[in-house]
Amino acid sequence: MRIVYYLLFFLCVTCGAHLSAQQVSPELQAKWDKENSLPENPLLHHAPSRLPDRITLVPASSLADEMAVIWRTDTTVKSSRIEIIAADTLTFPKENRRRFNGSYNVVHYKDYPMHYHKVIVKNLDRGTLYKYRVGNSPDWSPWHTYRHGNFEDTVRLLYFGDTQNGIYEHTTKIYKEAAKKFDNAGLAVYIGDLINHADNDYEWSEWHAATGDINTTLPVIATPGNHEYLKNLDGKKTRLSAYWTSTFPYPYEWDAGQYYMDFGFVRFIVLNSNEKLDAQAEWLDSLLNNTQQDWVVLVSHHPVFSGAKNRQNKGLQENWLPVIKKHRDKIGLVLQGHDHTYARGGFPERDVNKTNPSHPVFTVTVIGDKFYELDRQPWMDVAISHVSSYQYIELTRDRITYKAYSETNHLIDQFEINKPE
């Protein structure tokens, strides 16, 4: 009987359903329902329909010749299909369009279920511009444009901190400005806490609406924050939201949610700072021992070095920091969020050079409109309080160029890391 119970529990979690009334106390269910309620005056249509929405490009593996495309519909749509064609011609004749089929899984909001679709597009040519649409006749999405990355010489990316608050009203203009100003970027990195409440369907609608210009055109790398987790009555994290696992089906090493992606000469190592810190430290050390890429970029929600008052992460400093120090010559950047401020710097024992720092450089940033009080510390080279920002980063084999822009598009920080000869 116990085996049957755990099997049912596993199936419930993987399909995205809320735990049933027999498995969750009425008090806990009431807590989750309150967190997942709609605002008094919703700004957006949020319920699913037959028309595809929430379209997101996700690397299915180290970027070679394939890409996963994710989208949402209501449960009447049971086919998962994409049409794609090279966009170097004046027209898009049907006979030249390639079609791929995929699968879907069910995610349950408290008021309705929905289908999250996934299709793997294969045999993409590097550097080629494509047009694609998802759905099925007559319920197709608009055509979107995607250039499959060619990362032989330069890797260009946009990096965003926590959204969480002011998702649609505040951050939409910043995401759009970043996409417009740096339309040559080939990747987008999200640092977690995309929303405030893990299973709030309306908040996910706001995030997808705010980031749509980016997510439909750039491959997305993301790591979960603490707000992507459902929590019990004591505030302890219980499980990662099904919205996360359905939107971001990365090749996770195990259920702790870490993975890595190689884009040419850069290896992105994405860690889950919410759980299993010791096991991830062992995995990270083993992975870095065998990493030959010119640069490594670490991505984590919680920062190793905090940027705000009373928010030290001892677990990361005890488990991850020794590994980072051991492999410091390989690691260029450690991209982080969580502390709702802007700061960047390095090991406290470093030689301070604000414009040409030694690596690794640790960064903390936020794009939403919720801020914490800055706590200036020895690890910081630059620290700015109460500012929403986005970051543009270029990596070549011997140099990293980093620029941070405020919500008013003013350059607030920049530096270069040069690889020692």
Image (cartoon, helix red, strand yellow):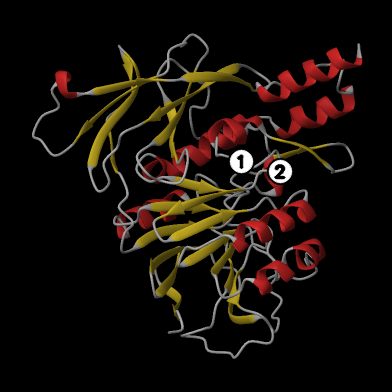
Residue furthest front as drawn: 290
> Compared to 226, does 250 lie above or below?
above
- Counting from the top left corner in percent of width and height, residue 183 is at 29, 55
Question: Who's the residue at 58% across and 46% down the image?
Answer: 194
Question: Who's the residue at 32% across and 49% down the image?
Answer: 149
The answer to whether residue 87 is left or right of residue 231 is: left
Question: Who's the residue at 53% across and 22% down the image?
Answer: 47
Q: Which residue is mark 2?
A: 256
Give yes or no for contact between labels 2 and 1 (Cβ–Cβ under 8 Å): yes
Q: Quadrant of the N terminus?
A: top right
> Compared to 296, does 215 lie above or below?
above
Q: Secondary structure at mark 2?
A: loop
> Compared to 310, does 261 lie above or below?
above
Which amino acid does the dot numbered 1 rest on? Tyr
Q: Which residue is mark 1?
A: 252
Q: Quadrant of residue 419?
A: bottom left
- Counting from the top left corner in percent of width and height, residue 165 is at 61, 49
- Counting from the top left corner in percent of width and height, residue 246 is at 57, 30
Dot 2 crowding, Cα within 10 Å, few <14, some 14–19, many 20+ = some
The answer to whether residue 149 is left or right of residue 381 is: left
Which amino acid does the dot numbered 2 rest on? Ala
